[in-house]
Image: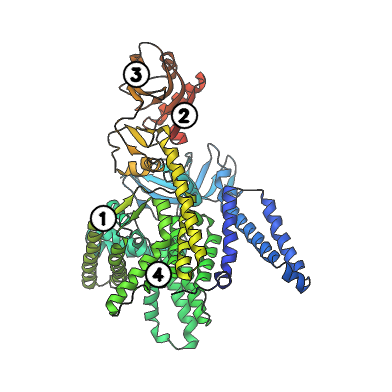
Amino acid sequence: MRYRYPYIWKQAPFLRLLLPFMAGILLQYYCPFPMFIAWIAIPAAILFLLLFNRRSSFLQWRFAWLNGAMIIIIFLSLGFLTGYYNDNTHRIAWYGNHIKDGRGLVINIEEPLTERPKSFKTSGAVRQIIADDSVITVNGSLLIYFQKDSLQQIPGYGARILVCKPLQPIKGSGNPGAFDYQRYAALQGLYHQLYLKRGDYILLDGRQTNWFDNFLFSLREKVLHALKTYIPGEKEAGMAEALLVGYKEDLDKDLVQSYSNTGVVHVIAISGMHLGLIYWLLNLLFIPFKGRKKLSWVKAVCIISGLWLFALLAGGGPSILRSAVMFTCIIIGDNLSRKASIYNSLAASAFILLCFHPGWLWDVGFQLSYIAVLSIVVFMQPVYHLMYVKNKLLDTLWKLTAVTFAAQLLTVPLCVYHFHQFPNYFLIANMVAVPLSGLVVLGEILLCAVAAIPVAANIAGSVLHTLIYWMNGFIERLQLLPHALWDGLQVNLLQTICMYIIIAGFAYWLLQKSKKGLFAGLLALLLFLSIKIVVLNEANHRTQLVVYNVPSHEAMDIICGGQYLFTGDSDLIEGSPLVNLQLNPYRRMSFCKPTDSLPGCVILDGGMLLNHKRIVVLDTSISTASFTEKINADIVVISQHPTLNILSLLQKINCSQLVIDASNPVWKVNKWKEEAGKAGLSCFSVVDNGAFVMNLN
């Protein structure tokens, strides 16, 4: 059966605007050029369009492509400008441009505090900088951590505080392949953080609040209170909070990992499914308005308001905002008796969201949200029609399976690229978790509605506890089955693009019966395998020393020919969260496996010899006094804060590179760096600069 798809380029005009707009955002981030070029390009292109459209019809037809080229230039430039001006660091009034030692900062607490094991976390907006004899009005946000103290009154939402403490830049670990928290925070407009103890700040008079934020935070607090009060069990209550309003602070980390390993972590993230349920409920409430044309716009406004209220109450993440924009377009289109193309609605919602927040282009949730919907739109019907099921109940089950499978077709390459794993039982997990989570969300809404009636609320809470308990138990058991997770997958960006070409090519071949799709898919497959061979060949001939940045820990890998020898703290065992987050990403990138010994690696007292290069590790068990005569070393690694100074070290060891790992206290690191600088010795601190990686070939 050949499937006919509409000519998307004509059916989705917003797509023609979205692609150059996205390209402009990417260009500004990765390859910026002077701003005046973008400012000149826009009016120049508009002027050209105005003059060109006054030419003869023949010339306009003959050079019609120039219209498209000018539109591309306009939206490419708009994307560039949007990305530039959305970055706070480019604004004159950004607080970071006015920070100097000794200046005070007036900060307004922007949101309620979130409790952590040792602190309270929130975000603050810097409003003013107090200079010697003036007050500078500024803007910009930062992260604030208040230390827990029984004698301290922690400021709440809207409070104003005066801080004279130096700001700390937000840093990532710098470990290769690991999550880059510094870039993630910067894309959210956050560059600094403050750790405040009692006495580090002064609570000022007056509060700065917003009535709508007050309403949202108050409503959110009431919802969370109702869920915590009436749903027994910490794991179940934490899951309920995440499912309804996206509050994840009480979620059990092992449970989240189980949902991730089985491919249903999307049910925890507030997304289109949740908003679809709210849309269905609101439509039920407004059934009396059906057929009354005079009240149709009242119904539309009420439903749109309800959807956006829920979207903002749930945190306003990119996936739910995408759904809110799409539902808004659908409702408006229905009231105008116009049915919009789903492709155009997708492109329009993405365009609107990126105008508001260009940094979402790098957000994994934003990417997966759009890719999943696109995948369902393209592949759901072909997959569903592979099998005819007469029984209505079984047909509904098959339809759910078809939707789940269709969504996976285009999300798999992106998931493998970002998360390096594939859940083999995703179909089974989704068939249970999706309907159950939908029932739970509806039940939670009912619970909040009857929270004022304790008897009804207790019954609803008990039922919800049972449903969530069954869902969690099923997912936790499913992940324990053999081969539940295909882990350790590693593809680069070019391979990911190849995977999409393979899927598109084969799909075009199967659905449109075109051999061009088959040839494109096979060519992309050949390129994918060629890249894999090259990468594996490089990995098999790689010899490296890697000193990781793991706070308060010693962690070092010697990588040689597809194997790695680990040296470090005993609590950094395989499978621990720190290892999974900080060490394993680069090990996967290097395609290497653990070993107890490496060929050509000789273990010496206080270090090792590899490829004729000597690595000396100095810690509390090995001191410079243990060397009876001066030795030559290529690299000296200082770990576990030993007692030494650099001058005494150089008297015993002749080295060219000093590396200080993350297990040493900051004051010692700074002292050794200063001493090394005076001695003219190259010194690398992993705390300041990220992981130390050196080729030993």
Check disc 2 and report the residue beneath it. Answer: 684
Mark positioned earlier in the residue sequence (2 or 3): 3
Q: How far is the residue under mark 1 from the one under mark 3?
A: 47 Å
Identify the element where label 4 is drawn: helix
- Return the mark for residue 479: 1
Check disc 3 and report the residue beneath it. Answer: 623
Kindly report which numbered mark, 1 or 3, lies closer to the viewer in this rendering: 1
How would you rate the neighbour count of disc 3 (Cα within 10 Å): few for under 14, some for 14-19, many for 20 or more?
some
494 vs 131, nearest the viewer: 494
Identify the element where label 3 is drawn: loop
- Return the mark for residue 594: none
Tag count: 4
Mark positioned earlier in the residue sequence (2 or 1): 1
Check disc 4 and report the residue beneath it. Answer: 275
Amino acid type at image mark 3: Ser
Kindly report which numbered mark, 2 or 1, lies closer to the viewer in this rendering: 1
Q: How far is the residue under mark 2 from the one under mark 3?
A: 20 Å
Mark positioned earlier in the residue sequence (4 or 2): 4
Position above or below: 198 against 280:
above
Amino acid type at image mark 4: Leu
Q: In this view of the protein, can residue 142 be seen by the observer? A: no
196 vs 31, nearest the viewer: 31
Position above or below: 270 against 337:
above
